[in-house]
Image (tube, rainbow, N blue to C red):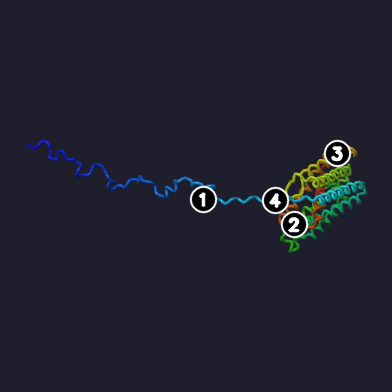
Amino acid sequence: MFPSTSPETGRDPWADDARPGPAGPARGLPPGPRTGPADDGEQRRERGPRRARKGGAPRRPDDEAAEPEEEVVEPVDVRKPLSLTVAGFAALLGVGLVLGAQTAGPGHRLPFAFIVFGVQLLFVLAWTMAMRPPALMLVAVVSAAVAGAADVAAVQSDIAGLAPLGYVAAGGFVLGVLGQLVRRVDRIRVTDSLGTTLLIVVGVVAFATLITLSRIPAGTQAITVCLAATGVALTVARLTDAVLPWPRLAPQVPRGAAGVVAGAMIGTLTSAVLGSYLVGFTPTSAALIGLVTAATAVLADLAVGYAEAGRLMAGEPPTLWIARHMQGPLGGFALAAPAAYAMSVLFL
């Protein structure tokens, strides 16, 4: 008989052969993923932010450079003697125009026209010297001729209106531009001088509206009210700048907001007081037209200061100081004249 048990009984059946199950990678299959620590690149990417150094910020090569600090602009000094001088000039200009308007009458307007023409020449001198257009002499001569023609048209026209003055202003502007186009030297800068020529021509024609206003009913009284308010507003604004130029509207402009507001308010009060004594006016109507003209004048004067500061910041050399400081009051009266005409036609 065969033995009932195999002769291999008692031996470890797995002693000679390999144990079941793959001890390594299976044949023909790629090795499995590593379970060990990640490589240096992954450790570097997974590592958190570096620790800060003692007493300082973390050291990084891409630290941004510190932003430069903004430059502090020192405010321009307000020269009190200059402000007082400009205030005196504005007062004299207002008194001269108001008294000249009293000489105007039916058929007797030439004295007032001569006074207006003198103011127009001052306007041409101050504004051409301050703004310096390319063909300075040409613009000055054309503007003076336009001023005379506008005064003649205001006196001699059959109907008191602004149409003749508009024709004169358009013709003077075209003549000034053509004169600069003819000159080869100024032809390149003709676009720069268009605005300057238009501004000066319109300014001298604006003064001629006072002659036209004197020809309508109650026009002389309206001139008195409006120009008195304008002169007082400009004078008070400059006097306030000499005493209290605060708060400063801009560091480069030696003007204060207190002067602008006080000038407009006191100018309006002056017109209201005059309206209670003049025929054809009430304190309310006089205050209304006085407010418009006074506010217009002080804002124009302030705008001239900003324009001058802009020219200086652009590096342009300063011009004749007397022309530069006459520019503001003359510009204020030039803008107040058509405003007075418009308010008188609309509300009187």
Amino acid type at mark 3: Ala
Q: Circle 2: is it few (<14), some (14-19), or many (20+) Cα within 10 Å?
A: many
Residue 165, can we see it?
no
Amino acid type at mark 4: Val
In space, the residues marked 2 and 1 are separated at their CA atoms by 56 Å
Numbered label attached to residue 35: none
Residue located beneath label 2 in the image: 193
Badge 2 or badge 3: first in the primary sequence: 2
In space, the residues marked 1 and 4 are separated at their CA atoms by 35 Å
Q: Quadrant of the C terminus?
A: top right
Amino acid type at mark 2: Ser
Residue located beneath label 1 in the image: 60
> Mark 3, mark 1: which one is toward the viewer?
1
Question: Residue at 75% of width from left, 54% of height from top?
Answer: 195
> Mark 4, mark 3: which one is toward the viewer?
4
Residue located beneath label 4 in the image: 73
Residue located beneath label 3 in the image: 272
Badge 3 or badge 1: first in the primary sequence: 1
Q: Position of residue 28 (x, y in %)?
A: 28, 48
